[in-house]
Image (cartoon, rainbow, N blue to C red):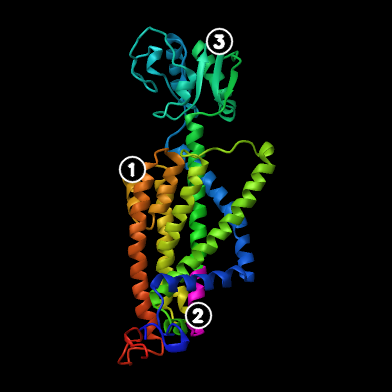
Amino acid sequence: MNARENGNSGPIENARLSLWQAAYIIARRDFQAVLFSKAFLFFLLGPIFFLGISGGAGMLGAKAAERSQDPTMAVALDASESAAFVAAHGQLEQLTRMPEIFVPATSGLSADAGTDAGTGAGSGAKMDPQALLEDADRNVAAVLTGSLAAPRLIGPDERIESWKGPVALIAATARGDTGSYPAVSLEPTASSVASKRSSNAAIATGSLTLLFLLTMLLAGMVLSNLVEEKGNKIIEVLAAAIPMDAVFLGKLFAMLAISFVGIAVWGGLGGAVLALGAGAIGPLPEPAVGWPVFCALFLVYFAMAYLLIGSIFLAIGSLAPTVRDVQTLSMPATILQLAVFFLATFAVNDIGSPIETLAVIFPLSSPYAMLGRAAQQAALWPHVLAIGYQVLATGILVKMGAALFRSRVMKSGPQGVKSGRKWWSRKPAA
């Protein structure tokens, strides 16, 4: 007789499933239970509040980015007029706030306050205004060309409108004729490096805020589900049939699958709104890596962030005997997650700084920091390295959480430490 067969009864009942087969069964069970529940409908309404918070955070992030490096105006006039404009700017700046300015080296000026060192004095050559607006080394928001009598301001419409008055005042002061102000002609452009940095900073801050809120909501759901099943003794029933590691992994990946369903619904609705209202909304600012790659990276980093914090929350749930105890035990993890979010938000406006490098290396903040970097830098190879590192860190943390989960949950079951034989060491019936 085959060792795995028993006469007419087929495969023996005690044949155990593999870890991943058992985890799949738990994941399917939890996924179906949550997907067809009333709570899932309220879960889908959550992004209405998230979008408001993310939009506000994005605007704050854009303002913070502007403050970290004030937008400047490039003065590309003739050498003598540029010198007069700089002198008048310095005079007026002592009385009221004026836009930050700089004079490109090719204007022929020597080194001075607010200017670059000249390399071709007296040449009168001017740089191309569009090249100045796209100069990544300077946060140029507008370019002043023409002459003091007929200044011409080139840049994004909103910026040049706000700088029109100050430019007329400085030009009149530079000419020594404050009784009449020259008419400043405006030449709007699509964007500048300053506006791109501002929009990219807004995308970075808004996306990592949304990532944080989604992760915290889902981690809380998996935690409450675990504590409820512990109270109903369902965990003990599952532990008698399958390994506890499989229960841990199944619950973790079930909620991850539920979250992807929610993201698909929200993404579909958002795409429909953008498609129908494209004319009224206008073109959206694009992250540095482009929207298709950015959306793919958002999903990957969301999965990493969720698995990391979800494994911690499940381990905490194994320590909490009642729902009341969850609030106390989960508080340190919640505070840690808030600290991670603030670290990533602070670091996202200073790419390459030591604090940003720390945020990238620390496993819990790495998904947030790298998502912010994707919005502001086009290079893709750092994301390949970061995702590999995060997968490794996730595997280690999930393994540690599963070990704690197994040791703590099994103590509350009917096959506790008083039993001489563990359930996993029992021999199947002959």
Q: Position of residue 224 (x, y in %)?
A: 51, 73
Instruction: Please rate how many residues cluster around mark 2, counting C-alpha atoms within 10 Å: few if below 14, some from 14 to 19, many from 20.
Output: few
Say which label, 1 or 3, has the lower sequence index.
3
* Cα distance between the residues tagged 2 and 1: 45 Å
Discs 1, 3 touching: Cβ within 8 Å? no
Residue 305: % across, % down: 43, 58
Residue 94 location, quadrant: top left
Count neighbours of disc 3 (C-alpha within 10 A) and say few if under 14, some if 14 to 19, many if 20 or more: some
Is 312 part of what is drawn in magenta?
A: no
The answer to whether residue 5 is visible is yes
Element at label 1? loop
Residue beneath label 1, please? 353
Q: Earlier in the sequence, mark 3 or mark 2?
A: 3
**Which residue in the structure is indicated by mark 3?**
149
Asked which secondary structure carries label 2, the reply is helix
Q: Amino acid at mark 3?
A: Ala
State whether residue 150 is above or below residue 9. Answer: above
Label 3, label 2: how far apart the Cα atoms are: 79 Å
State the residue in front, 380 or 67. Answer: 380
| Pair 2/1: label in front | 2
Q: Which residue is located at x 37 percent, y 22 percent?
A: 113
Q: Which residues are magenta?
A: 221-234
Q: Position of residue 381 (x, y in %)?
A: 36, 42
Looking at the rendered structure, the kind of residue marked 2 is Glu
- Amino acid at the residue labelled 1: Ser
Q: Which residue is mark 2?
A: 229
Whether residue 330 appears in this view of the structure is no
Q: CA distance from mark 1 to mark 3?
A: 44 Å
Measuring 60% from the left and 60% from the top, which residue is drawn there? 46
Residue 49 location in percent, x, y? Answer: 60, 57
Image check: 110 left or right of 224?
Answer: left
